[in-house]
Image (tube, rainbow, N blue to C red):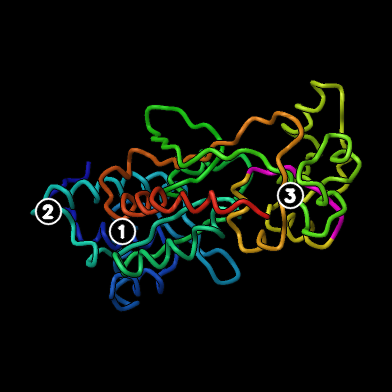
Amino acid sequence: MVKLRGIDLNLLVILDALLDEAHVGRAAGRLGLSQPATSNALARARALFEDPLLVRAPPTGLRRTRRADAIRAPLRAALAELATIVSDGPPDLTELRGAVRLVASDVPAAALGAALAAELAKRAPGIDLIFHPWHVGDEVERLERGEVDLVVTVASASGASLRTEALGTYPYAIIMRHDHPAAAPHSLDIDRWLAFPHVVVSGRGDRRGSVDAALARIGRDRRVATVVPTFLQALELLHETDLLAAFPTGVLATNVATRLTSRPPPIVLEPVSLNLVRHHRTDLDPAVTLVAELVHDLAPRLHGREAS
């Protein structure tokens, strides 16, 4: 059994950066160390854990071993708790160094990303914000595995290890280009709405969703002519075609939506709620806490404006 008194805490700090970056050079730059010193620390960590921890992944990168993935989240949580124990008071945000990893779909990332980065640059310039790719349906699992720190999602998350905070609720709107034939009347009846082809957003390529279920309940259906994986792609299509879309009003916060108009839906559609989810292991991490607070403060921007 490894004796705690024989472990160099600085080594664990360097290892935390190495496992987060999976890159010796980036970890060295983040910590203000030379690459040889960081490589030496990796060699010592490998001896301590009796595992390679990071192995070559052609053509140029490194990947974490199973052992590294297993210790990554507990190590980060332990270091955050130690920092709290030895701290004289609230952390100096300007002195924080590290990275916060966030998963969000294209609309929240586009609508909040610039403001979030600007606020971090002012309040905690040493914190890097890393947006991870959105993979449909596995965002909460990635959070639980420690791959990311925060998730913005419409999915419901439950469990003793997870904390969920509501960011907002968004009703549906029918969205189209300004000069669309269906835009002439101020209100849109169901027959005119269903007379045009529709675009649907689905990361899995599904043609049917909650809107189609609502139509089926009243014995109607629509023609879904196009399916795309992101809302931003769908909004571009709406600007260039006669397609219509039934989307939550949060998409109107994006810049491309200024070229579109919206109408209330002619049927009842349940609003969509957006949540911020984090894991309890980051409760004492001041960087993750700061980014979570900023996301909550900036979330009202997702209400955007009503397209005219």
Q: Which tag is nearer the camera, tag 3 or tag 2?
A: 3
Q: Position of residue 16 (x, y in %)?
A: 33, 57
Residue at point 79% right, 31% down? Answer: 212
Quarter of the image with the C terminus in it:
bottom right
Check the image and report above or below for 172 versus 243.
Answer: above
Residue contact at pointers 1 and 3, CB within 8 angstroms = no
Mark 1 or mark 3, whichever is nearer to me: 3
Q: Quadrant of the N terminus?
A: top left
Q: Is residue 245 magenta?
A: yes
Q: Which residue is mark 1?
A: 45
Instruction: Give the CA separation, mark 2 to mark 1.
Output: 26 Å
Q: Residues within 10 Å of mark 1 (few under 14, many from 20)?
A: many
Say which of 198 and 284 sits in front: 198
Can you give x and y, in whole percent of width and height, for residue 252 in the image? 62, 53
Earlier sequence position, callout 1 versus callout 3: 1
The numbered disc on residue 174 is none
**Quick check: 236 left or right of 87?**
right
According to the picture, the residue beneath numbered tag 2 turns out to be 87
Residue drawn at point x = 88 percent, y = 40 percent: 192
Place of residue 307 in the rendered image (x, y in percent of width and height, measured from the top left): 66, 54
Q: Is residue 60 left or right of residue 123?
A: right
**Residue shown at the point (77%, 59%) measured from the top left:** 178
Give the amino acid type for the residue marked by disc 3 in the picture.
Ile
Foreground: 257 or 230? 257
Q: Which residue is tagged 3?
A: 175
